[in-house]
Image (tube, rainbow, N blue to C red):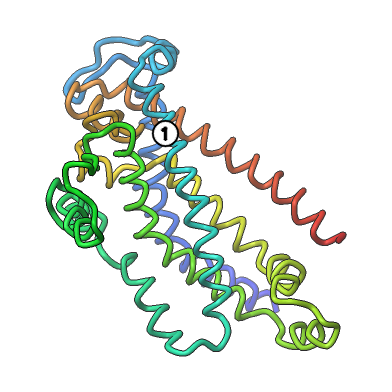
Amino acid sequence: MIGRKKEKFITGTAFMLIPIVLLLVFTYIPFAKMFGYSFYNMSYTRVKGYVGFKNYIKVFERDDCFKALKLSLYYMAGSIIQLVLALYLATVLSFKVKGGNFYKGLIFFPYLINGIAVGFIFKFFYTRGFVFDTVLQWCGFDLKNLPFWLRDQRINNWSLVATSIWRYVGQNMVLFIGAIMSVDPSLYEASMLDGASRFQQFKYIILPSIKTIVVLNVILSITGSLSAFEPPYVITSGANGTGTYFVIMHQIAHTHDKVGLASAMAIILLLIIIAATILQKLFFKYVFKDTKEA
């Protein structure tokens, strides 16, 4: 018996050894190094001196960092639209719909496209007089009355948010469909006998049953909102007020060669994400508690 337990321990340790080593080498050790860099005034080539928490203070003193962080609100609003749309599509396509598999594949396909490629696609899509403007002109709009989708600061960030929604709604939908398909069909039959409507089935059966996936999708969406990078970097290069926190951090680290300051920005973003995750869990714990009691 002892020999078998020892064998299981050795086997389990052997299987976990490689993933643990990879995590240490490519995640935890680099993170520890970055955390150390955040307390120094340094570039990629030399350390200029220890500055303590001055880099963290500078992050909140710089207007570009604070304004970039506020841009996350656009992406958070977009993530809410994205999740609501994905949940609606998943609820509809989880039941028998003619051509359901085709629509699932069609909606999920954008997620399979590389983010850089998506950026270049929408860069030309939004360019003045190109695809989007042409389609709107077919619908009767005058080109002179249309805004510059990537230059007008009243709308350019919403244009970039729409790009993210288009790409990620399929991923959220597939996760929701997988969760909805695992719900016991007898619950639907019993609710129909009791005269429950489709909305009541969604509220009292589907939503409480998939709450884990809902919370997971919300956390992933909010995290993605705070760390949005590819759309503004590829499509606009952060110009005209579209530079998100990650884009500004990239410029500070690689253009201005301020590695210490960029490291402090990364640590602050991590703390914000952790705080947002905790708040979301507490919020959904309260929301689903009320749903369950109802």
Q: Where's residue 231, x and y in %? A: 28, 46
Q: Where's residue 21, x and y in %? A: 40, 54
Q: In the figure, is residue 229 to the left or right of 95? A: left
Q: Which residue is at a point 37% across and 9% down the rendered structure image?
A: 51
**Residue at numbered disc 1:** 32
Q: In the figure, is residue 51 to the left or right of 181? A: left
Who is closer to the viewer here, 228 or 148? 148
Instruction: State the image quarter where residue 178 is shown.
Output: bottom right
Residue type at numbered disc 1:
Ala
Who is closer to the viewer here, 277 or 96? 96
Q: Where's residue 73, x and y in %? A: 47, 36
Q: Which residue is at a point 43% across and 43% down the rendered structure image?
A: 75
Q: Where's residue 4, x and y in %? A: 63, 78
Measured along the vertical axis of the image, is residue 277 above or below residue 140? above
Measured along the vertical axis of the image, is residue 114 above or below residue 78? below
Q: The N terminus is located in which quarter? A: bottom right
